[in-house]
Image (cartoon, grey):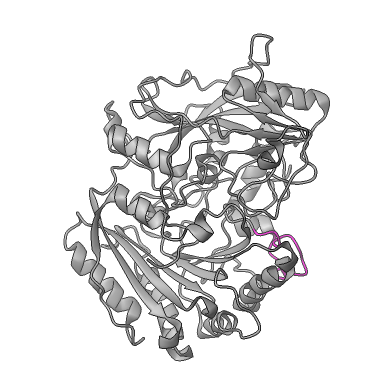
Amino acid sequence: MAHISRRSLLSGTAAVAGTAVAGMATGAPAHAATTTTTTTTTTTPALTVTPGDPRYPDLVVGNNQRWVATPDAVRLVTSSAQVLQAVQEAVDAGKRVSVRSGGHCYADFVYHSASKVVIDMSAMNRISYDQHRQAFAVEPGALLIAVYETLQKGWNVTLPAGVCPTVGIGGHATGGGYGLLSRSHGVVADHIEAVEMVVVDANRVARLVVASRASTDPNRDLWWACAGGGGGNFGIITRYWFRSPNAAGTIPGQQLPRPPREVLVSNVPVPWVALDQARFTTLVRNFGTWYAQNAGADSPYTALSGVAFIPHRSAGGMGLLTQIDAGVPDAERLLADYLAAVTRDTGITAPYPPRRLRWLAATRLIGTSNPATMLDPTMRSAVKSAYLRRSFTDTQIAALWRNLTRQDYANPNATLQLTGVAGGKVNRVATTATAYPHRNSAFLALYENFWINPAEDAQHVGWLRDIYGQTFAATGGYPVPNDQTDGCYINSPDMDIRDPEINRSGVPWSTLYYKENYPRLQQVKARWDPTNFFRHSQSITLP
């Protein structure tokens, strides 16, 4: 298989302890009103790990080794009550908190020098069906592969989530969350029915609240913000309830999308030596053009999602990975037509025979195709993103070619990934219906880099800045929302986006991430986090 990078969109497999397949446990009461629960002496405190503990070094860094914190303590919570208590204690002590679910964050949102208490939710990973709410209750520490396996084995349902096996659902869902099924079923945020969250009010009292999508819920604004507004902004989500907005009845298997029974998986390897600049230009243009032409919710290709994985030339080759639901009519013909369109006039010999696999087996296979970048816990990384509404221009593709074939730089993990996860049913939802705003895009470009040696940070970050800034040079180095580009993805946070010397577009970081939804997000922030207790380097600011 072609190499697939960490967090992008081809997920994998890892066994996760502590999740229930039978899952008939009932979640918290489905009330909509705020519960003013505060800490009590009967709550068993969370396990506290301090700097002298031998476990401490492993608990103050995530998958991105660039960011390491030195908190006074890490609180390993296992329940909503423990989160509530830990937050109240931090408030009373005047200590800043940060929150970990799965630990996959390219930026310093969790692990930074100002964090004095890290609330680690990795042990809060239970998955169950809530009969009262008729929705699936999932705690934020549940990893994506556990979510897939538990939902599929227990009820034959799934979420259209991402693909890296060790991403936690916590941060993934609240930032939008996309994957290979998104063109068929939307983003993960579209299926959030409710959230349970610890918030801190103006009197600096921690409370546990529930907010749902119900039109009669007085807390609905908080649900709206959590459905795409990004993590760490309003409070700490201690539980999600997932139910599709069009779900009906009381049968659990009808409350979320059913995964495909089988999928066709195609992998077309493309050696760099087979491409000159003209053929490379054609390939990249073809990819973008096809997705722009099939971005509508009525496209016959919503069951198909593809990735063009294009590492630096030093990797030796690139790959076109495609998955389609094998159960749709003429699936093999649709896949063949797609590959023919993407490879037309490039000299690439296609089609290559696809593999017919059970959906869960395909998910495991794709997710473990490149352990070096998907699962290696020693990597340092950086990322930039761009939603596109139509294909790159030839000038932009020339910038891609120039940097991907540079002779003065060589790193096989320096990658451009064109991901066909936008469009389709994602675009059926109005831009303001949830906080996730990218509802008129065709595909997503991820610029990623992975390395190990800290002494090489400037070199690898510099390459990433070069290829990205040169691609979008005409708009100040960033993909501003216009008729071609549609901003950036908050779940792939870019540490440069607030730097005016690098982001010369004149468009604020908040508009690049949230577009016209940002002022409303600020109003939600003012209501639910009026003291700005929950914050990080790119968090939503008070109005």
Report which quarter residue 515 is drawn in: bottom right
Q: 463 or 28: which is nearer to us? A: 463
Residue 446: percent from the left, percent from the top?
A: 53, 65
Closer to us: 482 or 320: 320
- In the drawing, does residue 319 fall left or right of residue 88? left
* Residue occupying image coordinates x 58% and y 45%: 229
Q: In this view, does 278 lie above or below 143?
A: below
Residue at (30% x, 29% y) in the render = 252
Q: What's the residue at 46%, 48% (across, down)?
A: 165
Q: Position of residue 320 (x, y in %)?
A: 38, 71
Q: Is residue 505 magenta?
A: yes
Residue beneath the point at 54% across and 68% down: 485
The span shown in magenta is: 494-508
The quadrant of the picture occupied by the C terminus is top right
Query: What is the chief secondary structure element of the magenta stretch?
Result: loop
Judge whether residue 204 can be spotted in this image: no
Asked if residue 308 is among those painted magenta in the image, a careful observer would answer no
